Amino acid sequence: MEGGRRGEAAAAAAAGTGPVFTLEEVAKRNSSREAWLVIHGRVYDVTRFLEEHPGGEEVLLEQAGRDATESFEDVGHSTDAREMLKQYYIGEVHPSDREKEGSKNPSRTSSGQTSFWSTWLIPIVGALVLGLMCRYYMMDGKSS
């Protein structure tokens, strides 16, 4: 039975559909008996994964019951870790809570992805400006 439920959850995760939970409901699941996380607006039940987590169960329990998106991204999880998330997917964050959560980080788009502007364009423009400034000062030093 549980294997079938996992398969359904994986299919729902791929489709981006599933039961809807409020952040208040998720907040109640913050112990080693039941540990839920929110990552990019999706709810995951990581209770079964607590003992297997390479960083230790304390890391997950510290984030349990709340939005762990920032912590998840800061660690720089591998593609395999992101794939593993699918098997723990149980639903979505309620749209009204998602709006509150989305207001935290302006560099993220509504789908939870980091925007192109903050990831690539701004650093590239900054590097170009610094390069031009260095070149200008180097040329200025040779002419005097």
Image (tube, helix red, strand yellow):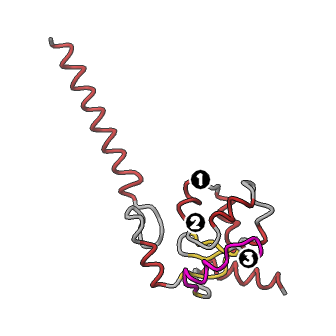
Tell whether position 24 is magenta. yes
Quarter of the picture holding the C terminus: top left
Which residue is tagged 1? Answer: 76
Which residue is tagged 2? Answer: 68
Provide the secondary structure element on which disc 3 rests: loop
**Three-letter code, disc 2:** Ala
Provide the secondary structure element on which disc 1 rests: loop
Spot occupied by residue 37 in the image (x, y as percentages of width and height): 63, 71
When the figure is inspected, residue 74 is found, relative to residue 26, above or below; the finding is above
Which residue is tagged 3? Answer: 34
Query: On the image, which quarter does residue 115 sit in?
Result: bottom left
Marks 3 and 1 sit apart, C-alpha to C-alpha, by 25 Å
Disc 3 crowd rating (10 Å Cα; few below 14, some 14-19, many 20+) is some
The magenta stretch is 21-34
Spot occupied by residue 5 in the image (x, y as percentages of width and height): 77, 85
**Three-letter code, disc 1:** Gly
